[in-house]
Each structure stands twice: as C-alpha cells, then as structure tokens.
Image: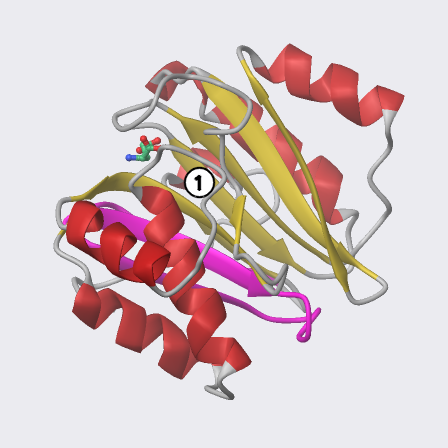
C-alpha cells in the first residue's frame, strides 16, 4: 500500500508533505496529491503518474506556504489512475479534503445513498464516499473528530484516513482500521504518516496508532 502524510506546524507544510511522499515512493504508487488550507479555502493539486508530475503542476500553479497540509500517493484499486481519481478528495461543498489508503468495501451502497440525496461525485473511487460523508457531518455542525468517528462507523474494510477542514486551519484528523498510521510528535509540530520514514528527518518520536483509533 502506498503513502499518506499529514503535517501541522511552523514549517512550510507543502514542502514537508512532498518530501514525505518522496520518501515513501518505494511503497509504489500511480498518482500523487497535496491539499493545504489558504485563507479559509482548500487548495488541492493532484496528478496521475510520478511525484515529478505533481511537482510540475505545483511549479506552474504554486501552493501557498501554510502550516497545515496533507499528501497522498495512490495505488488505484477503485477507478483508474487518473487526475480526477487521485487524492485528496474534496467534499461537494468544498469543506473537507480527505486522503485514504486501503479499500472501503461498502462504498457502493453508501455512494448510491448519497447520490440519491443529490450529492455529486467527481471520481470513481471508493474513497470519495468518505470525503462526502465527512463533509456532510461537519456541515451539519459536528466537530471534525466526532464527524470522523461517525464516518468510520459507517465504513467497512481497511483504511487509513486523514482529513482537513477549511474552517479549522490548524487541525487535522486521522483514523485507521486494518491499515497503518504512525504519529510523529515534534516540538510545536506533529506529523501523521503511513510510515515513519516519511517524517524521520524531523522527529524520531513516533507513536503507532492503535486499531480503530
Ligand atoms: N481505494 C482507494 C483508491 O482506489 C485508495 C487506494 C490506495 O490505498 O492508495 O483510490
């Protein structure tokens, strides 16, 4: 399985995240993407192919220096390796961005239910149901962490999920079930990643997150 990284702290999140993705390249992937929060809005760059392709679109259309960012390398399981299917996925109202490693086994009925309620999907991934469900929860007023718990209860399968909410630019939430997630605790900064190699140059204080956390 491929790579997830999230960062909150004083460094330039975009650079920490892209460097972390590069250190997880050995895990294999077919697309890569990054999301940050700028002036209360999500800003996402994602691209099929190598991280060099992501670098190129960031060079063309720069991402601001921010203190929060999430990044993903995808190994497609549901939907081909296209730009649209690359992560992060953003909920229909533009409220949350979410990345996912693993498989959401019950995505089809969840997707059908959301579509019946008028939610428009931008990708063919299983992941996007989690983004849409999370967006719906926070838009209804749920706290971001509570919303993530609610979403995880609705999901079956194996997943590591990391999400940010444009309304909370200093907070990210993460959850895992049957898929790895490690926290990196720094001084005034924190990391989450699939693998300690993603943040080892910044902190050696790593905590493995327990199952269903
Ligand atoms: N199942 C998800 C997808 O196809 C995530 C795959 C992964 O672990 O990167 O987009």
In reply to whether residue 161 is colored magenta, the answer given is: yes
Specify few, some or many for label 1: CA neighbours under 10 Å numbering under 14, 14-19, or 20 or more.
many
Location of ligand 1 given as a quarter of the image: top left
Image quarter of residue 210: bottom left
Residue ID for mark 1: 4
Residue 76 image offset from top left, x and y in percent: 33, 23
- Rendered view: 177 above or below 21: below
Observer-nearest of 193 and 31: 31
Q: How many marks overall?
A: 1
Task: Provide residue 184's location: percent of width, then percent of height.
Answer: 48, 55
For the point 63% across and 59% down, the residue is 94
Q: Which residues are magenta?
A: 159-186
Which residue is depicted at the point 35% across and 55% down?
115
Is 160 a magenta residue?
Answer: yes
Residue 140 visible from this viewpoint: yes
Visible residue check, residue 184: no
Q: Is residue 46 left or right of residue 213?
A: right
Where residue 211 appears, x then y in whole percent?
A: 16, 62
Q: Secondary structure at mark 1?
A: strand
Residue at point 13%, 45% (across, down): 105
Quadrant housing the N terminus = top left
> Residue sitting at 50 percent across and 44 percent down?
5
In the image: residue 107, left or right of residue 51 = left
Percent position (x, y) of residue 119?
44, 58
Quarter in which the C terminus is drawn: bottom left
């Amino acid at each position: 399985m491929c790579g997830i990284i999230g960062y909150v702290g004083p460094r330039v999140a975009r650079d920490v995240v892209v460097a972390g993705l590069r250190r997880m390249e050995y895990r294999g992937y077919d697309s890569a993407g990054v999301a940050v929060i700028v002036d209360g809005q999500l800003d996402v760059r994602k691209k099929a192919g190598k991280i060099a392709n992501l670098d190129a679109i960031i060079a063309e259309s720069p991402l601001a220096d921010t203190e929060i960012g999430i990044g993903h390398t995808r190994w497609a399981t549901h939907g081909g390796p296209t730009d649209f299917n690359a992560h992060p996925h953003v909920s229909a109202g533009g409220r949350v961005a979410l990345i996912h490693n693993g498989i959401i086994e019950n995505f089809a009925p969840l997707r059908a239910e959301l579509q019946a309620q008028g939610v428009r999907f931008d990708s063919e991934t299983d992941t996007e149901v989690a983004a849409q469900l999370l967006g719906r929860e926070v838009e209804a007023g749920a706290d971001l962490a509570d919303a993530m718990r609610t979403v995880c209860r609705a999901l079956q399968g194996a997943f590591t999920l990391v999400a940010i909410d444009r309304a909370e630019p200093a907070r990210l939430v993460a959850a895992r079930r049957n898929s790895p997630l490690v926290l990196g605790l720094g001084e005034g900064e924190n990391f989450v990643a699939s693998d300690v190699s993603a943040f080892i140059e910044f902190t050696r204080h790593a905590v493995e997150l327990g199952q269903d956390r």
